[in-house]
Structures are given as C-alpha cells and as structure tokens.
Image: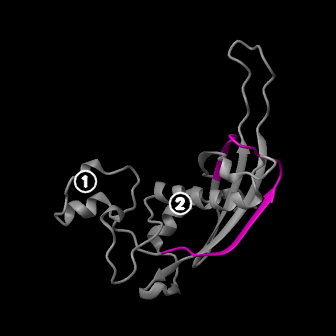
Amino acid sequence: MELRSVYTTQRRVEFRDTDAAGIVHFSAFFPLMESAEHEMLRSLGISVMPSRSGEDRPESAFHPAEIASRGQEKDLKASDAVANSPSPSLPHVTWPRVSAHCDYRAAARFEDLLEISVSVLQLGNSSVQYGFRFTRPASPQGADNHGPPSLPVTLIAEGKLTAVCCQLAGGGRLTKTPIPEELRKLLAKHLDQQTFSA
C-alpha cells in the first residue's frame, strides 16, 4: 500500500479563536480548515480565487510570470516569483463548499500550536472532499532530560470539507464544471491512498 500524501501546516491558537473559558470555540475550526486548504492549493500552484469573466484582476493577484509576459514588470520580475504561486496556465475555476463537518476530540487552548494535516479523501467528476486532522504536537522533555515528562501527540479534531469545481461568470454566477485534468493531477498528489485501499 502506498503511503498517503498529506499536506501539513501549523497554526498558533489566537485569542480571537477562544471562548470565555479560553478553549478554542467550535466555529474557529472551519476558518482554520479553509486556510489550510488554501495553503495546500497554493503549494500546488492552484489559484484559490480566479478573476471573474470580463473583470480586471488587481496587480497583486497576477502570477509574476504573467506580469513579466505582459511587459508590465514594474518592480516585480519573474525571477522574484514566490515559490508555488498560482500558475497562469492552469484553468481558472473556483471551489464553493457544499458540505462542512468537524468532530471534536479534545480541547485546544489559547497559544497552543496546532498541526493541521490536509489530504484529498475523494476526487469526483466535479467535486473534491478534503480531510483535516488537527493535532497538538508532542511536547518534548527538556534537553537535559529534566523537567516534566513529555506529552504525546493529542488529536484535537477531525473535519471534512466538500467543494464543487465551478466556473465563475460575471455577476458572481457559478456553473458546475468537471475538474480539469491538469488540476485533477495536482490534487491527486495529496490523495489519501488509504481511503481507496481494499
């Protein structure tokens, strides 16, 4: 069996994420999932929000190679491109959510460092389902092996988001469309192979 390819990032719990007891409010996990998903998409070179048909994108929304190829370099050169910026050659689609779910396993608190793992659970014709796993990393014992014992990795929450591939037209109109093959291949890099193993 192949090992699953998981994208992992970290977030520090902010004060705004907590309730009166200092515990992360249940609703805070949904923006964290979306943020981790966007980071994973950008790591693949996939644009999170394309321009709408007939509308101009702000200069900051263009991939540096697009700016250089248009002859509008200004102070940004293609060689200064940020690694993994959205590619101008990929299809411009957007991904509205049709389902969001989160199960809570343990409390996270203000200033905890959470590790968020993102994988693709299912790739349908026009939909993708992401799986999320929130953990608090193990806390190591002091370098001199003195002090409190280390704490194991703690599972905080597990979630799923399902998004549908859509073309974005003028006026914000969305039209469901099959996931373009170029994007399917990129998303498959984070496909959870354990989901499909027999």
192 left or right of 177 in image: right
Question: Callout 1 environment at 10 Å: few (<14), some (14 to 19), or many (20+)?
Answer: some
- The reply to whether the magenta stretch includes residue 114 is yes
Mark number displayed over residue 38: 2
- Residue 88 belongs to magenta span: no
Q: Is residue 187 above or below residue 172?
A: above
* x and y, in percent, of residue 89 in the image: 34, 68
Indicate which disc residue 2 carries.
Answer: none
| Whether residue 2 can be seen here | no
Q: Label 2 sits on what residue type?
A: His
- Single out the residue that lies furthest toward the front: 20
At numbered mark 2, what does the secondary structure look like: helix, strand or loop? helix
Mark 1 belongs to which amino acid? Ala
Residue 44 in the image: state x and y as whole percent: 47, 57
Q: Secondary structure at mark 1?
A: helix
**What residue is pinned by disc 1?**
78
**Residue plotted at (74% across, 14% down):** 145
Tell me which label, 2 or 1, sits earlier in the chain.
Answer: 2
Crowd rating for badge 2 (residues with CA inside 10 Å; few <14, some 14–19, many 20+): some
Left or right: residue 122 versus residue 188 is right
Q: Residue at x 27, y 59 (%)?
A: 65
Residue at 28% from the left image edge and 48% from the top image edge: 80
In the image, which residues are magenta?
A: 94-117
Image quadrant assignment for residue 124: bottom right
In-front residue for pair 148/164: 148
